[in-house]
Image (cartoon, grey):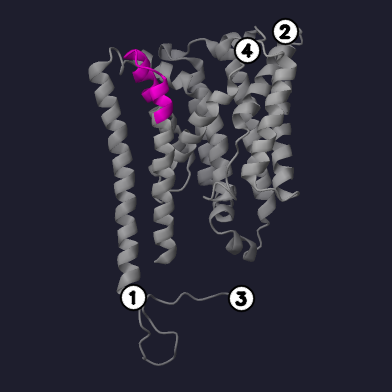
Amino acid sequence: MSVEAVPFGGSQQGDNTPVPARGFGAASGTAGRRIATLLLRGGSLAVFVAVLIVFSVTAPYFLSVGNIGNVLGQSAIAGVLAIGLTVVMIAGGGNVVTGGIDLSLAANMGLSAAVYAALSQAGLGDAVAVAGALATGLAIGVVNALAITLAGIVPLLATLAVMNVVAGLELVLTQNTVIPATGDLLTLLSGGGPFDIPVLAYVLIGFTLVAALVVQATPLGLRLYAVGEFPEAARASGLSVKPFIAGSFVFSGFCGGIAGILSVSYLSGSTTGAGDLLLPVVVTALLGTVFSRRLVPIVTGTLLSALFVGFLVNGFQLLNLSSTLVSGIQGLLILFVVSATTLLRKQETSA
């Protein structure tokens, strides 16, 4: 049965009796939200540009091609993880308690890196090590998906529990030490590409383009957004919501496996400080929403956010400023983005 659209302020009756249009308060509320959204997006872009200008003036070689390439390369691990979290946020909705959040991503990367390094050190070759790391990431994603969609545990608690289990497994495997690793693939990934830009930078750009095409330009991506933003409407249209949510966590786990491989190439071994990457990943994913027109998570926005965070860290390093300031700024960014988007959503709901 098709439903015919009714013109704004028009009549559903057969005569010319006018039907009152929506009140001025609703219209003004919508206009106010649009203005607030534009201010938030414009302000974020202005801050991004201001950071680049300040650091380009105060820090030597900040805007050089080599330094920009280094920032891209250094942002590759957190960027890939943030893209995984972005897809979870799209499918799960904006509520980080009951919807889209995956706190196990950083621990996933750490265990995947440890598995890769252990297999590589055992002399099993690059192919086996890659398969082991990706399988580890996917397995963690499947556990998250089952805990959330079958057991009914809210994502915040489910992924928090999985994070602790995975971190414990990493400690058991590595004995809280760094497992060194070498190999042709690691040498390739850790090297330089065209224009003396690190290969990891090209990996990040390529991965972002593929993910953006799938999520933002295919029917699958449209369904993910529908499931996250309008789950009841998605069910009414015949979509099964749980498979999409489960799939987003499986993809997130896959991103953890990829990030584990990139981490081993960057550090020439496993890492014992994977948990420290959780805050930058969450900041990157949340901040990426301000680069979209409707303040929703988008993959390309996540890339811009990753660059912003990367330039911020890089500028502090070039100026020999304390890295602890960066953590404080990242925390403030989370508070700012979550508060602003929450207020705007409340305005939209009440309009």
Q: CA distance from mark 1 to mark 4?
A: 63 Å
Q: Nearer the viewer, residue 22 or 159?
A: 159
* Total marks placed: 4
User: Looking at the image, can residue 207 be seen?
Assistant: no
Mark 2, secondary structure of its residue:
helix
The picture quadrant where one finds residue 52 is top left
Instruction: State the image coordinates of residue 119 (x, y, percent, origin top left).
Output: 74, 13
Say which of marks 3 and 1 sits in front.
1
User: Looking at the image, can residue 345 be seen?
Assistant: yes
Stretch in magenta: 310-328
The crowding category of the residue bearing disc 2, from other C-alpha atoms within 10 Å (few below 14, some 14 to 19, many at least 20), is: some
Residue 326 sits inside the magenta stretch: yes
Label 2 vs 1, first from the N-terminus? 1
Q: Amino acid at mark 2?
A: Gln
Q: Amino acid at mark 1?
A: Gly
Residue indicated by mark 4:
185
* Disc assigned to residue 169: none
Residue indicated by mark 3:
1
Instruction: State the image coordinates of residue 96 (x, y, percent, origin top left).
Output: 55, 46
The picture quadrant where one finds residue 47 is top left
Q: CA distance from mark 2 to mark 3?
A: 62 Å
Q: Is residue 336 left or right of residue 211?
A: left
